Amino acid sequence: MKQIYLDHASTTPVRPEALDAMLPYFGDKFGNPSSIYPLGQAASDAVAEARETLASVIGASPREVFFTSGGTEADNWAIKGFSHANSAKGKHLITSSIEHHAVLHACEALEREGFEVTYLPVDERGLVRANDLREALRPDTILASVMFANNEIGTIQPVRELAAIAHEHGTAFHTDAVQAFGHEPIDVDDLGIDMLSASAHKIYGPKGVGLLYVRKGVKLANLLDGGQQERGRRATTENVPGIVGFAKAAELAAVEMASEHDRQCALRDHAIRRVLAEIPHAKLNGSWESRLAGNVNFSFEFIEGEGMLLQLAARGISASSGSACTSGSLDPSHVLLAIGLPHEVAHGSLRLTIGRSTTQEDMDFAIDSLKATLENLRMMSPLYEDFKQGRAESVIEKLAADGFPYTS
Ligand SMILES: *Cc1c(COP(=O)(O)O)cnc(C)c1O
């Protein structure tokens, strides 16, 4: 049976060019970058070249790029490392209520240490309101952290405006750009970003490697004490193959960004139009306009998300019903609740994320399968029976009447 992978926000396959670039560093170029003989220097040169490539992709200087084990580590380092190094100036942070758990749980850990955190709400389209940030800033606010693009509903935040507001108050600005890096143009100077997190495995690089951009002059506590790697701030022998693969993936993503963005936007919009036209009691979650090219996220009434995912999997379609970290738990996604969805609607949600290999034919097959799946599930649903008999109301119809956009 044909397998259609529509979960690229969760992870991506390593592209062959990145794998080819990595392989020698597992083999005959295995040296330790800290060694002075040629084998070590070749590895050290490869890491330096990768750092330059990755810095240039975001308009940074190589000295501002620090390698990490992934997006989660970069987020933790930015938030905890910055707070620990700057707590004499204040102990208040601001973030949004729709951040990835890497940011939210890092903030909660700081709260247990005596820091205070304000979690900004989002509007019904999943966007942070600039005015909410302005009003939340206090004299003791040291850091604002708002994600570039959301991993569940794909909404792209007004980062330039948010960073400018933070700076007016002397507050530093971090962004979790794991979903945007390599997909959206990012220039850290132009946008006013002080710290930025990215991860290789979301852009066809290997798992287990990421980066934290730290603007020159920004104080950060060391993450790992040990040797002199990463200029003494994150010791441990470098993940040379991973770093090389990350740089190759980022370099190619930059070359392909504009064409791939347009191609994926067309697929995304086609999917949204088809679902809203052909499937009743459906709702697009998150802004349509300010949205990643590869993300669609819908809620469907009268069905259970888990049942939908299992039936789609049986038809060869890999999709997700929110973030991978929350599947397995029965709590609805914190992101879908934050945009104002009632629990029963949030439970019936589906995320399809498009990648380089996704074709229009794949997308049409997925939507056809989705239609059949939902018809199946609704046929067996007592809730749907009640609705058809006029004994229950449609929550999505009520949301639409309240002004929620993009419903059917
Ligand atoms: C995937 C993801 C992360 C975590 O990245 P890892 O490299 O898997 O640790 C953090 N933030 C966002 C927005 C993500 O999508």
Image (cartoon, rainbow, N blue to C red):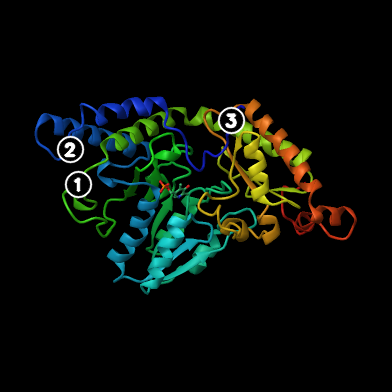
The part of the image, by quadrant, that contains residue 398 is: bottom right
Q: Is the C-beta of the residue carrying label 1 under 8 Å from the nearest atom of ligand 1?
A: no
Q: Does 201 appear above or below 121?
A: above
Q: Position of residue 291 (x, y in %)?
A: 58, 44
Q: Secondary structure at mark 1?
A: helix
Q: Secondary structure at mark 2?
A: loop
Front position in the image: 97 or 299:
299
What amino acid type is highlighted by mark number 3? Gln
Q: Is residue 392 left or right of residue 326?
A: right
What amino acid type is highlighted by mark number 2? Pro
Q: CA distance from mark 1 to mark 2?
A: 9 Å
Res 3 label? 3
Q: Earlier in the sequence, mark 1 or mark 2?
A: 2
Which tag is nearer the camera, tag 3 or tag 1?
3
Q: Earlier in the sequence, mark 3 or mark 1?
A: 3
* Image quadrant occupied by the N terminus: top right
